[in-house]
Amino acid sequence: MKWAVLVGGTGSNLRALLEHRVDVGVVISHRTGVGALEIADSFGVPWRVLTAREYPDRDHYGEVLRHALAEFDVNAIALAGFLRWLDDETVNRYRNCILNVHPSLLPAFPGLNAVQQALDYGVRCTGVTVHIVDEGQDSGPIVAQEPVAIEPDDTEESLLPRIHAVEHRIYPQAVRAFDQGLISISGRLVKYAGG
Ligand code: GRF
């Protein structure tokens, strides 16, 4: 499959996907000047920036986004730090072919600042979820999850590297499983062929 990776930050997950030889046709960022674009450059992957300032209307943003996806002939999308909501038409067009990585054990702590949310709540364990993107917020079927223990004196700063280490391992694994046709989705249930 040819993937678009949608970013907005440092791009560490983009790097992990590229290092695992995921075929990334284009990187699309909702912010200018972010590290993810430098990473795209360093791997020779073309990129586009579509900011909310340029396209404030969500449907129009979706239209421009779909145009870019079609231009690069991608058939699947991996979100990695992309903080714009996808419009319904884009979700529909790429139904079950859009993945996201989220830094909590969903359905706990959806949305922004998930790591800090977990620390504030006082849970002893959080983690990472890879899920299919649907129309809701971090609500689609779960493809992969792995827990990360929270130590009593953890801060966001000390916990984040352990979360990221898990993301960089399980996100490429999930994307590669998609590539190999090992994943089937029925309602909320995601099955891996052969295990
Ligand atoms: C990751 O922590 C991911 O879980 C969240 O956004 C962050 C992106 O980080 N969705 P990076 O830009 O891949 O380093």
Image: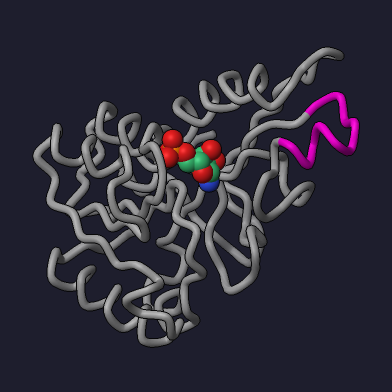
Asked if 119 appears above or below 77 in the picture, the reply is above
Q: Which residue is drawn at 74% across and 22% down?
A: 155
Question: Overall secondary structure of the magenta stretch?
Answer: helix
Q: Residue at x 56, y 68 (%)?
A: 134
Query: Looking at the rendering, in which quadrant would you find the C terminus?
Result: top right
Asked if 99 appears above or below 168 in the picture, the reply is below
Please state the extent of the stretch shown in magenta in the rendering.
Answer: 116-125
Quadrant of residue 59 in the image?
bottom left
Q: Which residue is drawn at 43% across and 53% down?
A: 79
- For residue 88, side relative to residue 145 (left or right): left
Q: In x, y percent, where is residue 153?
A: 82, 13
Considering depth in this image, is 152 or 17 the residue closer to the camera?
Answer: 152
- For residue 2, side relative to residue 110 (left or right): left
Q: Is residue 121 magenta?
A: yes
Q: In x, y percent, where is residue 194?
A: 49, 36
Q: Which residue is drawn at 32% across and 76% down?
A: 54
Asked if 71 appears above or below 163 in the picture, the reply is below
Q: In x, y percent, where is residue 120?
A: 85, 36
Q: In x, y percent, where is residue 143?
A: 57, 46
Q: Residue furthest left?
A: 44
